[in-house]
């Protein structure tokens, strides 16, 4: 059963990578060289045995292929769609060094995992009950991967989630041309089908429950609360209608309807992946003039180059070396006041100008949530992120963390890898191994 409305603005988007049918999948699988010590596997944070799952597609063992994927990454269905494969497995495929197209690993992974979902193949059962319980914060990729692994090992799991929807940013943040919210929710339901993972919605750590309450209820704790709210410029006029944090705006149109009829020009401020997603999303939602405003140079953008190249083809304009300094408007925003910057990002006198915009999205980073824990013996924070060792353990006994709240903001696949890694370590801790 889907948790999301059918009236979502995101439904207008088509998949930007069309799925393979059987003949295409088998043909692509047969191109794989099944490399020893395969570089594509080393590039995958969850270390999926890529040549093995591809070989199983070539021999029409799709059920086994999907199992190879899920054994390493239980979120293999969403990762097939949302992973930046161009800079991970596909980017490291040996074919790149042979001037030939790399193997389309993401599309092959989607082929196998989609068939597993369609067929309802079941692979995993909960382990024998250990009598131990784990409390997990947030129902995003990191906690879900941790909880599934913990259930396989026989531990009871309760996830505390402040939102009404499950899936974290996989549901509320990922660009709809990669994956829509209902697909992410379907994945969560599939993960939960192992049984024994209780999700309590509407429970916010720091508001409805303190860390000490949480710790007292469980034998171990996993922190998977991701990142915080969008950052703002703190410039005059920021409270006007039409000025939004980009991640909050993306959540709004992914989960519901938005009206952009009065918006002919929109600006997205920032140069990272959220900014690049947001400009492409505004084009897809029908805004005629979309401009990315970034204070650095184009080459200094942290957003993936392949995504930014696609945005330019879709008609997105850009103003580089440009710093927003304020807003124009009367109740509703009508423009963004900017100044040009030199190559050292210093303002250039006399270059103040205003760019028209009825919508301004700020994609200049998200806050960190380490402060929710308060002062806790043994839990260290760096720049608001929870510090963990190579097993996901904090310095406090029984407290583990993973995903964006610990790594500072990476990808879904990192959350999946770090959740599973912490589950293995929590198991050893709880069983006294
Ligand atoms: C706009 C955007 C687009 C992205 N696109 C991609 C992409 O295409 N591909 C990709 O791989 N990655 C993408 N990412 C990154 C990816 O979504 C994250 O790395 C991943 O979701 C992190 O998983 P997580 O479980 O650590 O955190 P989250 O997914 O953020 O989940 C955390 C959960 O914790 C809940 N929570 C927060 N605070 C509390 C609290 N106090 N109490 C209870 N619950 C709480 C939240 O509601 C949320 O459900 C994107 C990120 C953004 C912002
Ligand atoms: S590097 Fe490329 S060719 Fe080699 S195993 Fe991986 S996908 Fe196949």
Image (cartoon, rainbow, N blue to C red):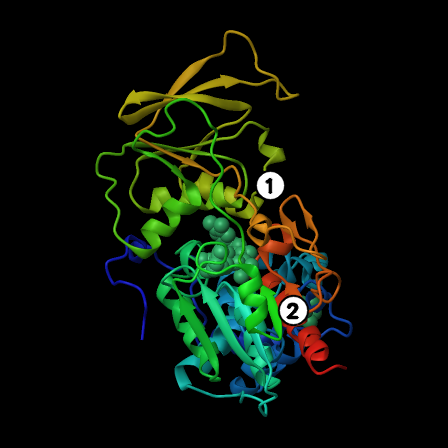
Residue 37 image offset from top left, x and y in percent: 78, 72
| Residue placed most toward the observer, 260 or 364 | 364
| Residue placed most toward the observer, 428 or 424 | 428
Image position of 387 (left or right of 206): right
Q: Residue at x 35, y 30 (%)?
A: 239
C-alpha gap between disc 1 and disc 2: 23 Å
Residue 169 image offset from top left, x and y in percent: 46, 57
| Residue placed most toward the observer, 74 or 292 | 74
Quarter of the rendering containing residue 360: top left
Pick the quarter of the image with the N terminus: bottom left
Q: Residue at x 71, y 67 (%)?
A: 397
Q: Residue at x 52, y 17 (%)?
A: 340
Q: Is residue 60 visible?
A: no
Q: Residue at x 68, y 58 (%)?
A: 96
Question: Which residue is label 1 attached to?
Answer: 302
Is 321 located above or below residue 103 in the figure? above
Residue 75 image offset from top left, x and y in percent: 53, 71
Residue 414 image offset from top left, x and y in percent: 62, 61
Question: Which residue is label 2 attached to?
Answer: 46
Mark 2 secondary-structure assignment? loop
Image position of 189 (left or right of 380): left
Q: Earlier in the sequence, mark 1 or mark 2?
A: 2
């Amino acid at each position: 059963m889907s948790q999301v409305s059918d009236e979502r603005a995101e439904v207008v988007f088509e998949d930007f990578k069309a799925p393979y049918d059987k003949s295409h999948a088998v043909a692509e699988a047969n191109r794989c060289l099944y490399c020893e010590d395969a570089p594509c596997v080393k590039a995958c944070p969850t270390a999926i045995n890529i040549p093995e799952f591809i070989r199983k597609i070539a021999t029409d063992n799709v059920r086994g292929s999907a199992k190879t994927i899920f054994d390493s990454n239980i979120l293999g269905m969403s990762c097939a769609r949302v992973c930046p494969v161009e800079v991970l497995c596909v980017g490291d495929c040996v074919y790149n060094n042979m001037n030939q197209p790399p193997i389309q690993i993401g599309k092959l992974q989607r082929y196998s995992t989609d068939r597993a979902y369609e067929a309802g193949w079941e692979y995993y059962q909960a382990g024998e009950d250990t009598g131990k319980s784990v409390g997990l914060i947030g129902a995003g990729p990191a906690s879900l991967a941790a909880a599934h692994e913990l259930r396989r090992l026989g531990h009871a799991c309760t996830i505390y989630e402040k939102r009404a929807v499950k899936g974290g940013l996989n549901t509320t943040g990922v660009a709809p041309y990669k994956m829509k919210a209902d697909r992410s929710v379907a994945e969560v339901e599939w993960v939960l089908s192992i049984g024994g993972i209780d999700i309590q919605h509407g429970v916010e750590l720091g508001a409805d429950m303190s860390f000490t309450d949480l710790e007292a209820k469980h034998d171990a704790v996993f922190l998977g609360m991701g990142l915080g709210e969008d950052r703002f410029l703190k410039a005059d006029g920021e409270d006007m209608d039409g000025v939004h944090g980009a991640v909050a705006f993306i959540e709004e149109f992914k989960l519901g309807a938005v009206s952009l009829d009065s918006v002919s020009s929109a600006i997205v401020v920032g140069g990272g992946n959220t900014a690049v997603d947001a400009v492409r999303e505004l084009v897809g939602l029908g805004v005629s003039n979309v401009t990315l405003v970034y204070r650095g140079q184009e080459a200094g953008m942290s957003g993936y180059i392949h995504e930014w190249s696609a945005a330019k083809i879709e008609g997105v304009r850009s103003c580089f070396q440009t710093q927003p300094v304020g807003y124009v408007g009367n109740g509703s925003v009508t423009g963004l006041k900017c100044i040009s910057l030199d190559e050292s990002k210093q303002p250039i006198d006399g270059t103040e100008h205003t760019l028209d915009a009825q919508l301004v999205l700020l994609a200049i980073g998200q806050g960190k949530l380490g402060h929710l824990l308060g002062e806790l013996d043994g839990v260290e924070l760096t720049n608001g992120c929870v510090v963990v060792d190579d097993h996901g353990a904090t310095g406090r006994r029984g407290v583990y963390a993973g995903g964006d709240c610990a790594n500072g903001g990476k990808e879904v696949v990192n959350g999946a890898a770090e959740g599973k890694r912490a589950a293995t370590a929590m198991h050893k801790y709880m069983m006294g191994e």
